[in-house]
Amino acid sequence: MSKRLFVLISVLILASMLLAACGGTGGGATAKTLKIVSSLPMTGSSLTQTQTIVNAMQLRLDQAKNTACGGKYTIAYEPWDDASAALGKWDPAVETENANKAAADKSIVAYLGTFNSGAAKLSIPILNGAGPLVMISPANTNPGLTKADKDLPGVTDSYYPTKVRNYARVVAADDIQGKVAANFVKSLGAKTVYILDDQELYGKGVADVFNATAKEIGLTVLGQEGIDPKAADYKALMTKISTSNAGGPPDAIYVGMVVDNNASQLLKDKVSIMGDNNKVKYVGPDGIQTQAFIDGAGADIAEGAYASVAGVPLSELPASGKQFVKDYEAKYGPLTEPYAVYGYETMNVALKAIEDVCTAGGDPTNRESVRAAVFAIKNFDGALGTWSFDANGDTSLTDMTFYQVKGGKYVSVGTFK
Amino acid sequence: METTKKKNFNLRSLGVLVLVLYIVFLIGPIAGLDVPTIAASIKANPLQLIQFLIIGISNGAIIAIIALGYTMVYGIIELINFAHGDVYMIGVFTSLTVLSLTGTLNSTNPVQIVLGLAFALIIAIVVCASLNATIERLAYRRLRNAPRLAPLISAIGMSFIIENIGLMWAAQAWLVPSFGTTGGASQKVFPDMLSALFKATGFNGGDVNLLVASGLPLRLTVKDILVIVLAVALMTGLYLFVQRTQLGKAMRATAQNRDAAKMLGIDIDLVITATFLIGGGLAGAAGLMAGLYNNTAWWFMGFRAGLQAFTAAVLGGIGNITGAMLGGFLIGLLASFSDGYLNARWTNAWVFATLVLILLFRPTGLLGEQVGQKA
């Protein structure tokens, strides 16, 4: 049996190698291939959001028929996963590996990602030294990635060892989100607030901004604590919070976290100890604005919880954005997740940069040309509206929309600046 | 199962203790150990102390039951069965699936809720027991005489495999409609059946909190009581089984010296399989209990539960059944008090610092036991 099997397998391997080789030469003869990759957490609760982002990126590429510069270049897109089953969310080791892989593959001209700010912090410096390879994020909101924090001088600069900026994002940062959220909580009539975070760069970052703003605008911050994102429950913590306001519960709780970090369990224990979300308001950032958060907690438990997301609701997007929603739903079914349109926009920006390089007579296989073209984007007519990148790589759009859970779905309740 | 000779504190360990206390009170305030504040909050709300006690014991009970699985397996074959926490996760999903398939999820009929829960408990125990025994058969048995790292690695491998099974399971909305469309990775709701039971019967005013009528600001729910009672019953049963039955005796003999036990005619394979069956069954029961208590099913929940249970087993003295229970309750209480009076950010640091401290003075754990001669 063994000899025959061996021969059979050898023949099969040889045949497949031959086929693969044919495929390679066949493709190379017609057009050069430019590769675009995305690095997003696709093992863990964030998958609900990241899958729609990947779908949207693919959609934009399909619309461009996978080509650029009038057919001179073929665009290949690969969605990479930066999460691991071992952590159940984005994994520093995997993200670093992805960045190194991208740095080494010369055909890659744009790195779309990351989803988590903590992950971006790791890959920006790696890609900065590789060309630099431009990185465009659909979802990172930690301010420090692009803007120097006056309390932590030099941190932002340390992400860019070559001193050239190679990181841009199409979403407004948390210096805006945290500030708007604090004002929003005050507008709900709250006077006291307890703040929790998931101890990550993103979650703690937005919670810190919220904390600082809350104090400025006269909200009483009863405390800020980091939760253990893998704990079985938070009943003891919620019991403590339930008497933190002179023996009673606070008016509101703000949670800076992503859904992977046990966000649903935290809400369950809050409701079981302190009652529904109308009594003690529950507000979070974009990390929990996903159906996975509601489904994980149960619609009745999640009822009344708020979450903010940069930008306007899908129904108020400009015409090109509405067209995107239509195209998306025709291909992938109903769209409720807010980040898909940002995913679409990142691919949009990458393709636009490649086209711009070609138009200017440059070489889009050159990473530096593509990077410069991304940062040169001004008054871009995209799916999110007309906007520009500033010198830091931040978008000029600063709208922030609040959503509330009503009947098991997030419903927009207002857009603020 | 006699405890070993107690080591007397000599001058050196006293010195270490003083040093440790000095460090705790020097660095402690950073991690929330602020004695005046803690004293003030206890004074302001003394009943809350009892509340944290209840929460700690309930959480500890679940950890303790899982810890039994670790400690039994370690006692017998000196293997840390890293997949054990994930077997517990499968227990949660099994009971949730059984509840869904029998239509118990949406039922408001108290009889069906009780019967459904009992049925789910049995199925979860059977499934997890078989799963655990299968893991032993597939991944550990052939490596029994291999270097000790080999079964450890295959245990970690099994853990990942089961986690991924959980990941796929949670995506099967056709099986359990309440899983929804958000994929296997997100947390799923384990319905609050006990609250539903109270609402259905109207008992205690339909409130799951037994102290609601007393007007005290305390919550002692039926969930707490069920978890604690079930845990203590299972642990007592296990203790009696190991101490009083023939198979239990064979287990103890195998734990003491595998080769000698074999020479005396004990079927080692049978004993080991029985150990895995019992450990898995306990994990299955813990799965249903945790589901009812925390109302969450999540493919990743086994990891942390396993870590804490393993810590509990080490804390109590690995290989010792009473020690594992003690360790479980201790960790539950530590976490609860740290969340309540210190700072949640540092809870894990406090739990593991305590572990280090205890192992520093009692390397064999609280009720430490000499395990085998094979180490």
Image (tube, helix red, strand yellow):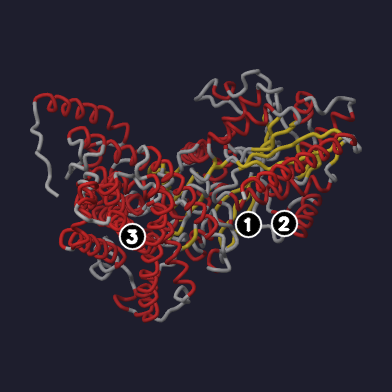
- Residue A225 in sight from this viewpoint: no
Measured Cα–Cα span from mark 1 to mark 3: 51 Å
Instruction: Write the residue at 55% across / 57% down.
Output: B168
Whether labels 2 and 1 belong to a single chain: the reply is yes
Instruction: Write the residue at 76% across / 26% down.
Output: A367
Return the residue nearer the eye: B246 or B292: B246
Q: Position of residue B59 (x, y in %)?
A: 30, 55
Return the residue nearer the eye: B28 or A397: B28
- Near mark 2 (Cα within 10 A), the count class, few <14, some 14-19 or many ≥20, is few
Q: Chain of mark 1?
A: A
Labelled pair 1, 3 in contact (Cβ < 8 Å): no
Q: Circle 3 is placed at which residue position?
A: B277
Instruction: Write the residue at 85% across / 46% down.
Output: A65
Measured Cα–Cα span from mark 3 to mark 2: 55 Å
Q: Circle 2 is placed at which residue position?
A: A315
- Residue B95 in sight from this viewpoint: yes
Return the residue nearer the eye: B150 or A415: B150
Q: Position of residue B39 (x, y in %)?
A: 21, 42
The amino acid marked with disc number 3 is Leu
Q: Element type at marker 1?
A: strand
Q: Give the mark nearer the N terminus: 2 vs 1.
A: 2
Front tag of 3 and 2: 3
In the current view of this chain or complex, which residue is farthest to the top? Answer: A162
Q: Circle 1 is placed at which residue position?
A: A412
Q: Position of residue B143 (x, y in %)?
A: 39, 44
Q: Position of residue A34 (x, y in %)?
A: 79, 34
